Image (cartoon, rainbow, N blue to C red):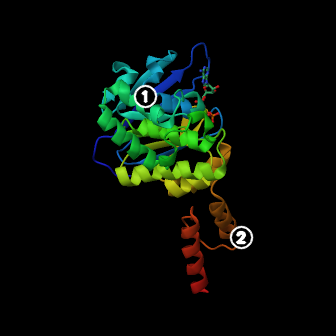
Amino acid sequence: MMNTKEPIIEFRDVTFYYPISETPALQNINLKIYEGEYVAILGLNGAGKTTLQLCLNGVIPNMIMGELTGDVFIKGLNTRDYPTRELAKIVGMVFDNPEFQLTQTSVAEEVALGLENLGTSPHDMEEIIGEVLQTVGLSGLKDRSPFELSGGQQQRLAIASALAMHPEIFVMDEPTSNVDPVGKEEIIAVAAKLNQEKHMTVILAEHEVEVVAQYADHVIVIDKGKIILDGTPQQVFNQIDVLAKCGLRTPQVTEFFNQINQSKKLGIKELPIKIDEAESLMLNQFEKK
Ligand SMILES: Nc1ncnc2c1ncn2[C@@H]1O[C@H](COP(=O)(O)OP(=O)(O)OP(=O)(O)O)[C@@H](O)[C@H]1O
Ligand SMILES: [Mg+2]
């Protein structure tokens, strides 16, 4: 990840304690994220993924008090100096429990809410609502009550509401509750589309390593509030032992090649992390024989 540009997100030696907590939820975090990256944050329950994400829109330290040392910069702005509502114009955030974010009586009104706060004209509003609902695949459900949607649809509605504000950085906590595997795949695919087509910087907290290997171009592994690995998916998922120490596994295809690499002494230096990479490596091996 060679880069001469300024990072769009930078953590400088950030440590954070929640109020009255004796152990830090984040410890000495140093991190640079560049515009257009699709970043996955991997870590077990309680590792600090959500806490790290809450630093991005200034909820930490501006709304959750606790004790923060070090600095977080978003497009060069120190989050200590800007209210969350200012940072919200740059950073869109969707939490893992969208049902608590939904308040309106129809899907369209739900998306309109944030736009009203921005003072968008009714004409522009209609256009933006149509566009973002199209993006997340909810065009046909404009008049439906948000509470009648499936978990996956609610998550996509929350995404649409965040997108309506045209954030440059899109942060998503892993869609876990109430989302079936297909719904989850759709959500991850929407994030990938935003990243590829709109060049949006995406920060996704995610458990499933296969999903991360498929979509992300930058992976951060966090354990007990510390960054343990930070690199490309290729680099990170080749660190099988380090991941295991954090209670994480590598994609199954990587695990498989690791085993036959050792047992058959194939001498593969970079283990594949995706199915298509594995396929070409396998065909190569056959041709050699
Ligand atoms: N509001 C809070 N007050 C006190 N401690 C908290 C609070 N929220 C989180 N913590 C603690 O901070 C640590 C990091 O939690 P965090 O929610 O960031 O982890 P996570 O990686 O998002 O976990 P999960 O996968 O379960 O969502 C944990 O030890 C957690 O117990
Ligand atoms: Mg979390």
Q: Position of residue 71 (x, y in %)?
A: 39, 25
Pointer 2 local density, CA inside 10 Å: few below 14, some 14–19, many at least 20: few
The image's mark for residue 263 is 2
In the picture as drawn, the residue positioned furthest to the right comes out as 263
The image quadrant of residue 32 is top left
Element type where label 1 sits in the image: helix
Q: Nearer the viewer, residue 20 or 276?
A: 276
Picture coordinates of residue 15 (x, y %)? 49, 25
Residue 186 has which mark? Answer: none
Residue, disc 1? 113
Q: Amino acid at mark 1?
A: Leu
Q: Within 10 angstroms of label 1, few (less than 14), some, or many (20 or more) residues?
A: some
Instruction: Dividing the image into four quarters, tell me where ligand 1 lies.
Output: top right
Residue at 57% in and 39% down: 154
Amino acid type indicated by mark 2: Ser
Q: Quadrant of the C terminus?
A: bottom right
Q: Percent position (x, y) of residue 193?
A: 44, 53
| Circle 1/circle 2 CB separation < 8 Å | no
Where is residue 288 drawn, in percent x and y?
A: 57, 85
Outermost residue, top side: 20
